[in-house]
């Protein structure tokens, strides 16, 4: 199993190209199930989760062709063409779904197009129990009959889905995406209320519109969808938006090392809550013609952060912010309001000398003068990223185990960081 070794102490100076967003790419790929015409997606990141989704779609009968790969220079990312001419299998099996919870995103499109779908129920994971009840209740609102059998969710709508008003009691990114895709093929009008407003949802909605779907309210918490038949949808060519979470992670990498980097392709409008907190901590963030520049003094100030649905501070940057605050002057209260168990990075950061105590949904971070390198364990994707950040400033060597978590969401992380002066390498054992 690979490990990452980091020798801390170097300030990051240079440029980092930000990749396409994993969390936008996954639902966009699932949207290919809605049409029998080719959907060509460019700027897809090279990540394990993208391959897992491609395998799952292929299992359902989607032909996938690679159209280009331009990671060396130019815009990053690869281009895939996805053609769901006919659906040959409506079951998403356990062996594929257990590799990635986002597999549940095929449920809505499959039942909408085929009138039935059977998807292995995703289990809990390291950041919380993560139920899918909101996805299922919303599909029931559109007329699907839902049952659970032997660990599988079965959705049936033999006469097709029908448009309806769906009111989410809690904001859910995945459930909004699933229902948005399903509503595109439901008969009549649907209204999705208390929809998540994450940029990844707007990206999906904009692609669906290019495919011929009628959707209004994009970017707001109420989406109206006027359904149509599969045969009325087109294919399209669509470029996946830039990864705001990857950009935020590297912004914090620059900040924790007192560095100065340009995040090429990053967009300030997708990162406002993060930029506000970084600025309050003493980081200088500015827009440039090619992206976002981040520069920081050697010491930052502690700032309190609460995670919230977009446009609030993203939960996917909470662990990295905790690492950043661990060497800031003063204290920071970090409150996690989205997931109930997203503090698995705290004991690992503590092994490196961070002074962090968890109290319910909050962690109190008291900044220390120095972190010390140590062997640590990645527990989930963003927790791993926080350990990388800590390793970049720690004295001595940090060894990060279980780096397959990092590979799910950060493309070529060692290359991107070493290109800015970090001493970081992947070691195969
Ligand atoms: C998406 O997960 C992201 N994943 C997550 O990114 C991200 O952390 C999360 O949104 C929140 O921003 C992808 O986009 C693939 P939710 P998702 O449904 O859709 C509860 C990363 O590191 N809930 O918005 O699964 C749920 O337990 C990942 O890249 C229900 O109760 O998140 C959570 O407390 C991790 N019932 C809250 O809602 C449901 O049916 C928000 O979850 C669904 C969710």
Image: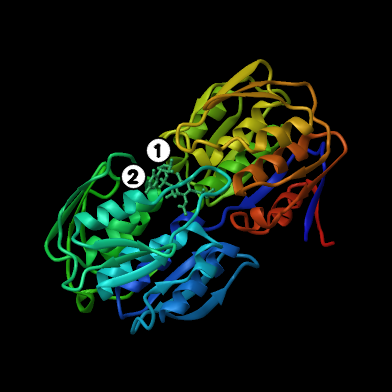
- Asked whether the beta carbons under mark 1 and mark 2 sit within 8 Å of each other, the answer is yes
Give left or right: position of 323 versus 125: right
Q: Residues within 10 Å of mark 1 (few under 14, many from 20)?
A: some
The N terminus, quarter of image = bottom right
**Residue on which the image places disc 2:** 196
Name the residue: 45% across, 37% down: 338
The C terminus, quarter of image = bottom right
Mark 2 lies within 8 Å of ligand 1 (Cβ measured): yes
Q: Quadrant of residue 373?
A: top right
Q: Is residue 156 above or below residue 100?
A: below
**Residue 48, percent across and down?**
60, 64
**Residue 380, percent across and down?**
62, 48
Q: Quadrant of residue 222?
A: top left
**Residue on which the image places disc 1:** 309
Give left or right: position of 142 versus 306: left
Viewer can see residue 21: no
Q: Is residue 231 above or below residue 428?
A: below
Give left or right: position of 182 versus 151: left
Q: Please tell me which residue lies in front, 424 or 292.
A: 424
Q: Residues within 10 Å of mark 2 (few under 14, many from 20)?
A: many
**Residue 288, percent across and down?**
53, 43
């Amino acid at each position: 199993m690979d490990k990452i070794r980091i020798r801390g102490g170097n300030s990051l100076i240079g440029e980092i190209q930000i990749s396409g967003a994993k969390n936008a790419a996954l639902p966009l790929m699932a949207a290919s199930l809605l049409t029998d015409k080719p959907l060509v997606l460019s700027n897809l990141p090279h990540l394990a989760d993208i391959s897992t989704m491609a395998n799952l779609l292929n299992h359902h009968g989607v032909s996938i062709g690679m159209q280009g790969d331009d990671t060396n220079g130019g815009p990053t990312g690869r281009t895939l063409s996805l053609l769901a001419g006919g659906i040959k299998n409506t079951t998403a099996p356990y062996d594929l779904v257990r590799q990635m919870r986002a597999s549940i995103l095929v449920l809505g499109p499959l039942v909408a197009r085929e009138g039935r779908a059977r998807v292995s129920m995703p289990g809990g994971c390291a950041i919380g129990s993560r139920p899918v009840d909101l996805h299922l209740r919303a599909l029931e609102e559109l007329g699907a009959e839902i049952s659970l059998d032997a660990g599988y969710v079965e959705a049936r709508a033999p006469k097709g889905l029908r448009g309806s008003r769906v009111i989410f009691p809690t904001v859910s990114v995945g459930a909004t995406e699933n229902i948005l895709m399903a509503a595109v093929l439901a008969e009549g009008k649907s209204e999705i209320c208390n929809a998540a407003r994450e940029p990844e949802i707007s990206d999906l909605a904009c692609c669906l519109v290019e495919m011929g779907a009628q959707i209004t309210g994009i970017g707001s918490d109420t989406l109206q969808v006027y359904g149509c038949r599969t045969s009325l949808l087109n294919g399209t060519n669509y470029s996946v938006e830039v990864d705001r979470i990857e950009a935020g992670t590297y912004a914090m990498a620059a900040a924790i090392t007192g560095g100065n980097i340009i995040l090429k392709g990053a967009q300030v409008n997708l990162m406002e809550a993060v930029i506000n907190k970084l600025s309050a901590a003493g980081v200088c963030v500015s827009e440039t013609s090619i992206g976002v520049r981040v520069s920081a003094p050697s010491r930052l100030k502690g700032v309190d952060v609460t995670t919230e649905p977009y446009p609030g501070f993203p939960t996917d940057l909470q662990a990295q912010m905790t690492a950043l605050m661990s060497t800031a002057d003063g204290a920071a209260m970090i409150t996690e309001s989205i997931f109930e168990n997203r503090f698995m990075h705290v004991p690992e950061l503590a092994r490196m000398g961070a002074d962090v105590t968890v109290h319910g949904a909050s962690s109190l971070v008291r900044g220390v003068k120095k972190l010390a390198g140590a062997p640590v364990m990645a527990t989930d994707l963003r927790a791993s990223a926080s350990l990388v950040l800590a390793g970049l400033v720690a004295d001595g060597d940090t060894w990060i185990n279980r780096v397959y978590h990092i590979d799910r969401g950060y493309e070529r992380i060692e290359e991107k960081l070493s290109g800015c002066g970090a001493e970081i390498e992947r070691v195969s054992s």
